[in-house]
């Protein structure tokens, strides 16, 4: 399945950050968060935005997960990894390994 | 009805280049009464209030506008993602620094070819070197660099060299988009349409480059719809996610809808006369092909109408004279023979070699701000406006 192959793209030690052409914005008219790039708008929810804010190329996926679990109840084990992996395949994020 | 996500602002149709593949309208003179700085600023403000997130600054050559820095600053203050779509001519170091300072998010630089002579020939203007300089400047100032290449019969065989050049320029992304036959490109279609062999070779080069380059450079390749079975989901549907405002203030649901809009027996929707909100929600031009009530068969009863929305209205209009027909690119369209004939001609072994392309004509600016009222020409790459909206997973 697609998700399985996506999971291989990032691992728990990866340190993600937004690609240089991507910016996180909150739009008041819509009341939504979005990731903006030249051709794409990815609407994300508040949890997604919280993940993105922690993706600073310093923290690992594991650290981001741990940090979010401290804040929210429903962040599942793989949420951060699959969210990051999906954005990586869409060139919205970059990961640095190790 | 959703709110629009993107606004394409075609600030001016003046341009130092004269690409034969330009998608600007043939009747350039009709758009010379350009919106003022204050008018554009009002448009951006209304757009942000309407929910627009992305602003594409294009033309013509947007750097021909002397107020470009002020316009970018205004958009930044409104929180818009700003994307400058430029030929690179007019991007001096000082200008670039001012734009960076004003918060410009992204620069898309158009590239014609990887060789000086061919590039200058396609652009109709000596411009190859200046584009190299512009690319370096973009990287030096810390912007991500996206190159836009419009592919056609004269440059598609150079795709390998173009990709090498992009790597040498340290481009982050390159968009290789086959020509959409609107405006000047429509006029020049028979000379621009590549052959099937050319396309197959190009696709093999792209596949190989993607494997070799991996994450180093994102390669976006847009196939020509003339060779597809189904049309493109043009604009994600008419007046669905984005719209265009052209230099004289007319708002269009699609960047190529100038002629279509004029042919319809309805008044133009001009930002000088109406608020954007009214235009988006009520203007007859925007309502005309919104949704699927307008659809004829075969689209009306087709499963794919939610996928491709019946294709491009502008293409239907350009080819059949009736914008409410199925896009003739679709193999189910009763007008598909029009597209087949063009494809057949492009693949005819007896096809004469060098036909002549009509370069995009000159626009002479008459507004006060264009003090050096020179003979300016226009060119632009078709704008890749098609946001995919992905609902957040987490
Ligand atoms: S129908 Fe859509 S894609 Fe085609 S020219 Fe019009 S706006 Fe562009
Ligand atoms: S018939 Fe219309 S809806 Fe169906 S595939 Fe063709 S263009 Fe799309």
Image: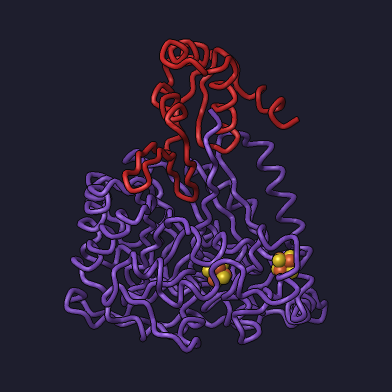
Establish if B184 lies above or below A27.
below
The percent position of residue B52, horizontal first and vertical second, equals 37, 54
Name the one closer to the observer, A84 or B119: A84
Residue B66: quadrant of the picture: bottom left
Image coordinates of residue B180 in percent, x first then y, are: 59, 69
Q: How many marks?
A: 0
**Which of B54 and B123 lies nearest the eye of the viewer?**
B54
Residue B241: x and y, percent?
48, 58
Q: In the depicted view, which residue is nearer to us: B204 or B353?
A: B204
Chain coloured purple: which letter?
Answer: B
Residue at 59 percent of width and 49 percent of height = B220
Give the red chain's letter.
A
Name the residue located 32 percent from the left edge and 66 percent from the top edge.
B276
Determine whether B46 is above or below B353 in the image: above
Q: Is residue B3 left or right of residue B205?
A: left
Query: Residue B369 falls in which quadrant of the image?
Result: bottom left
For residue B134, say whether it is visible.
Answer: no
Residue B241's place in the image compared with B76, above or below, is below
The answer to whether residue A74 shows anywhere in this view is: yes
> Position of B141 compared to A96: left or right?
left
Q: Is residue B169 above or below residue B222?
A: above
């Amino acid at each position: 399945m697609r998700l399985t192959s996506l999971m291989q793209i990032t691992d728990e030690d990866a340190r993600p950050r937004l690609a240089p052409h991507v910016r996180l914005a909150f739009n008041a008219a819509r009341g939504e968060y979005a990731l903006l790039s030249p051709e794409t708008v990815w609407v994300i929810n508040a949890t997604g935005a919280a993940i993105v804010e922690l993706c600073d190329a310093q923290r690992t996926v594991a650290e981001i997960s741990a940090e979010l679990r401290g804040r929210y109840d429903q962040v599942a084990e793989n949420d951060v990894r699959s969210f990051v992996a999906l954005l990586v395949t869409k060139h919205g994020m970059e990961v640095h390994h190790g | 009805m959703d709110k629009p996500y993107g606004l394409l602002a075609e600030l001016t149709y003046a341009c130092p280049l004269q690409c034969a593949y330009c998608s600007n309208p043939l009747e350039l003179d009709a758009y010379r009464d350009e919106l003022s700085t204050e008018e554009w600023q009002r448009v951006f403000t209304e757009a942000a209030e309407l929910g627009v997130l992305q602003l594409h600054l294009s033309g013509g050559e947007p750097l021909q506008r002397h107020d470009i820095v002020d316009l970018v600053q205004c958009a930044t203050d409104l929180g818009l993602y700003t994307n400058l779509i430029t030929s690179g001519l007019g991007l001096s170091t000082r200008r670039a620094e001012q734009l960076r300072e004003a918060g410009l998010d992204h620069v898309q630089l158009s590239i014609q070819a990887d060789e000086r002579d061919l590039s200058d020939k396609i652009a109709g203007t000596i411009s190859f070197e200046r584009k190299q300089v512009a690319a370096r400047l973009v990287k030096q100032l810390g912007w991500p660099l996206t190159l836009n290449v419009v592919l056609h019969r004269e440059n598609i065989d150079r795709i390998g060299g173009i990709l090498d050049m992009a790597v040498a320029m340290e481009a982050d992304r390159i968009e290789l988009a086959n020509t959409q036959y609107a405006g000047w490109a429509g006029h020049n279609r028979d000379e621009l349409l590549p052959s099937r062999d050319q396309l197959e070779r190009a696709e093999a080069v792209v596949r190989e480059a993607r494997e070799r380059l991996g994450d180093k450079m994102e390669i976006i390749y847009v196939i020509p719809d003339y060779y597809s079975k189904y049309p493109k989901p043009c604009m994600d549907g008419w007046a669905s996610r984005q719209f265009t405002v052209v230099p004289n203030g007319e708002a269009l649901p699609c960047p190529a809808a100038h002629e279509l809009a004029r042919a319809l027996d309805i008044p133009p929707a001009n930002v000088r006369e109406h608020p954007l909100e009214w235009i988006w929600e009520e203007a007859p031009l925007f309502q005309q092909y919104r949704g699927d009530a307008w659809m004829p068969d075969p689209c009306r009863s087709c499963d794919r109408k939610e996928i491709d929305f019946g294709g491009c209205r502008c293409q239907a209009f350009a080819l059949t004279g009736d914008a409410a027909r199925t896009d003739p690119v679709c193999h189910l369209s009763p007008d598909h023979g029009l597209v087949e004939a063009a494809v057949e001609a492009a693949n005819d072994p007896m096809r004469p070699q060098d036909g002549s392309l009509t370069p995009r004509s000159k626009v002479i600016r008459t507004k006060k701000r264009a003090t050096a009222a020179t003979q300016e020409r226009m060119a632009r790459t078709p704008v890749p406006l098609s946001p995919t909206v992905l609902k957040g997973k987490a």
